[in-house]
Amino acid sequence: MEAKRIAVIVGSLRKESFNRKIANNLIKLAPQDLELEISQLEMYNQDLDENPLQSWVEFRKAIKSFDGVIFVTPEYNRSIPGVLKNAIDVGSRPYGQSAWDKKPAAVISVSPGATGAFGANHHLRQCLVFLNMPVMQQPEAYIGDASKLFSENGDIAKESTRDFVKKFVTAFSEWVNHFGETEEFEPGHMTKTEEKKPELRM
Amino acid sequence: MEAKRIAVIVGSLRKESFNRKIANNLIKLAPQDLELEISQLEMYNQDLDENPLQSWVEFRKAIKSFDGVIFVTPEYNRSIPGVLKNAIDVGSRPYGQSAWDKKPAAVISVSPGATGAFGANHHLRQCLVFLNMPVMQQPEAYIGDASKLFSENGDIAKESTRDFVKKFVTAFSEWVNHFGETEEFEPGHMTKTEEKKPELRM
């Protein structure tokens, strides 16, 4: 069986982002049947749907090529960062051609506080409902105390957390394998009724 | 009594945005003791906190100068747009200097669908809890069927909706007046304990 390719979307642009570190560790700790790659992005404006930025075109194309997506998110103001939400919005458009459709997904939230960005984690899950991404339910991952987790080289120094992240990404491997190979993209649940069509035209 | 100045944040960059139209109508329908102005924005990156983009500096300064904020939001993927969330994130930083702190606020959500962007409306309210913005609870505003509301010049053609928007912005005038004049900015609930400080450092 060929390895599944997994996009890792990091909701922070900060160079020393804890979320990016968790993402890097996910990559290191992934089982051999998953290949993880980190993606990144620019602001969505529906006016540009017919003449999109090259960065959007590439982002959408990249996402479509993956077999699954792991979102690694901090919490900004009790929700996901604008940067991440924008990536989601860009990937979801234009109408009927969402790059996210049917991709199996997982969510890890990471914060220096005790609550492990729970608010962001579940806001994101609400978006994934609309996006028709089957989300791994367990294990849930709310990684708190992030400022104390990493060694100087960026590895997870705390053994229990390293074990947990390994368990998480291994479970995700099983999750992804419930679903078939990535097929030629075809719009899924988005039926083209007038009722639904304008949902994002605001 | 001097008129209160209200920032109107529109969560869409689209020129023909229904949300922008609602915002324009808010301005037209506001009682005389409110002055409404529309604001706009760029992507947040904490690495730039110490050397912020000029557009951020101006945005934060502008927000601080207002007496209240009305958020007008579409729903993208069952949440607020990345563009709007980014404006919120930019305004909230750097730590301890949030421009939103204590500003009385209101939320109107607008969509072409039947649910009136309910999902976005309440995601936004969760952010406003953290931001310590007292939010007007009633009337709630979930404006659906937005593609049928406007006349060619952009006014709200439907009388019941026009009346509702007028009632909404009038209630907001009362709401704002529960709170004092805008004082010199002082960080409010954000006490500088190590516990809380790194909350957004991700």
Image (cartoon, coloured by chain):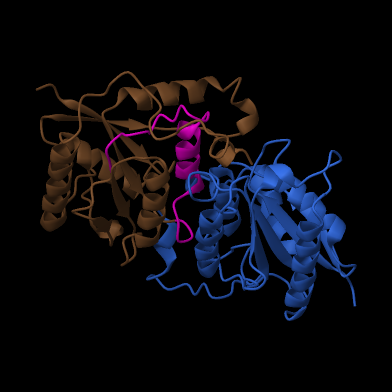
Chain colours: A brown, B blue
Examine the rendering and report whether any part of residue A145 can be seen: yes
Image vertical order of residue B96 relative to residue B94, above or below: below
**Residue B148 percent coordinates (x, y):** 72, 44
Relative vertical location of residue A110 with respect to residue B65 in this rendering, above or below: above
Observer-nearest residue: A86 or A39?
A86
Is residue B50 visible from the viewing direction of this image?
Answer: no
Q: Quadrant of residue A122?
A: bottom left
**Nearer to the camera, B60 or A187:** A187
Q: Is residue B72 magenta?
A: no
Q: Over which residues does the magenta segment extend?
A: A76-105
In the picture, measured across the screen, residue A167 lies left or right of residue B71, that is left
- Rendering coords of residue A8 (x, y %): 31, 36
Residue at 61 percent across and 48 percent down: it is B74
Q: Residue at x 75, y 79 (%)?
A: B180
Classify B72 as above or below B127. Answer: above
**Looking at the image, residue A91 lies above or below residue A58:** below
Q: Main secondary structure of the magenta part?
A: loop
Q: Residue at x 35, y 59 (%)?
A: A117
Occupied quadrant, residue B193: bottom left
Work out whether residue A2 or residue A78 is closer to the camera in this orientation and state it.
A2
**Which one is in front, A105 or B149?**
B149
Residue A103 included in the magenta stretch of the image: yes
Q: Is residue A76 left or right of residue A160?
A: right
**Residue A43, x across and y down, in percent:** 56, 35
In the rendered view of the protein, which quadrant contains the N terminus of chain A?
A: top left
Q: Residue A198 location, x and y as percent?
A: 59, 37
**Number of residue marks:** 0
Q: Quadrant of the C terminus of chain A?
A: top right
